[in-house]
Image: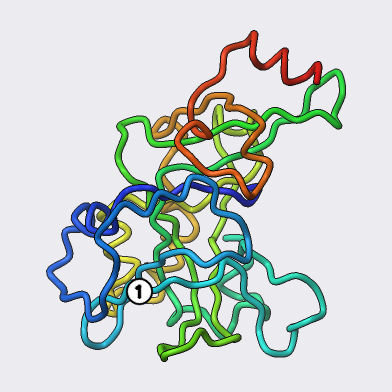
Amino acid sequence: MCGRYSIYESMDHYLRQLSLDLVVINGYDHEPISRFNVAPSTRVEVIRRVDEGLSVDRVKWGWSPFWAKGKRPDPINARAETVVMGKFFKALWPNGRALAPANGWFEWVPDPADPKRKQPYYITSADGGPLFFAALAEVHQGLEPDERDGFVVITAAADQGLVDIHDRKPLVLSPETAKEWLDPATSGERLEAIVEVGCRPAQDFRWFPVGKAVGNVKNQGHELIEPVSEQNRQGDLEL
């Protein structure tokens, strides 16, 4: 996963898909989020389970444990193969479980003739429904953002046709599995199974080339996720 995704519906839309009979304890904006180019280190909505119900928080994408702060940029992803037993995310596993709702994500595919040139692709659900990325988050609720706060998206190995786009993909959960992920009663064994085999398969997604404007973090707008024609792609390569 190359580090960009979209989340543009209202938060109510994602919460309805989860069908959770829980109260959201904090306020959130009911307007469309309209983020078509979410970049690392920016703050974006995540969903967490707390004692009183659900919490929707805007959290920085990227996290490091206290002992690794400042040594390198905060990682934005955690590999499914190592997140459960590894030292780096020990403070977040398993109690920091969260969901990063999304509509799709971007990957860059090198041109076989010139690896320095890369074509961005957008990957989204085949049925048009929202996506739920399995995430781990640290959040301290208060009047001001806490410098310790952040989240990472768990990634898994890509399968089938998605391998042609990138060898990694977000750990995308079905709404039913996403509810299990948030449920504090879910056993540790089941959580490990979700990390290992819970990702939705490649046939649940569709992907297509998009314009290169997504490469600039300042760019936003629905046009970033619209397919481009082969002619437009060639034009991009000639620039």
Q: What's the residue at 68%, 44% (across, down)?
A: 216
Q: Could you say whether the residue bearing mark 1 is in a helix, strand or loop?
A: strand
Please state which of residues 122 and 218 is positioned toward the viewer in this rendering.
218
**The image quarter in which residue 80 lies:** bottom right
Q: What's the residue at 39%, 74% (across, down)?
A: 57
Picture layout, residue 72 above or below residue 157: below
Q: What's the residue at 32%, 48% (across, down)?
A: 9
Picture layout, residue 159 above or below residue 193: above
Please state which of residues 222 and 132 is positioned toward the viewer in this rendering.
222
The colour scheme used here is rainbow
Residue 167 shown left or right of residue 53 in the figure = right
In the rendering, at what x and y percent does residue 76 appear? 63, 63
In the rendering, at what x and y percent does residue 231 appear? 64, 8
Picture layout, residue 49 above or below residue 121: below
Q: Residues within 10 Å of mark 1 (few under 14, many from 20)?
A: many
**Which residue is most to the left?**
21
Query: Circle 1 sits on which residue?
Result: 48
In the rendering, at what x and y percent does residue 60 appear? 55, 71
Picture layout, residue 237 above or below residue 223: above
Total marks shown come to: 1
Instruction: Say which amino acid is labelled 1.
Output: Arg
The C terminus lies in which quarter of the figure?
A: top right
In the rendering, at what x and y percent does residue 49 appear? 31, 77
**Which residue is most to the top?**
231
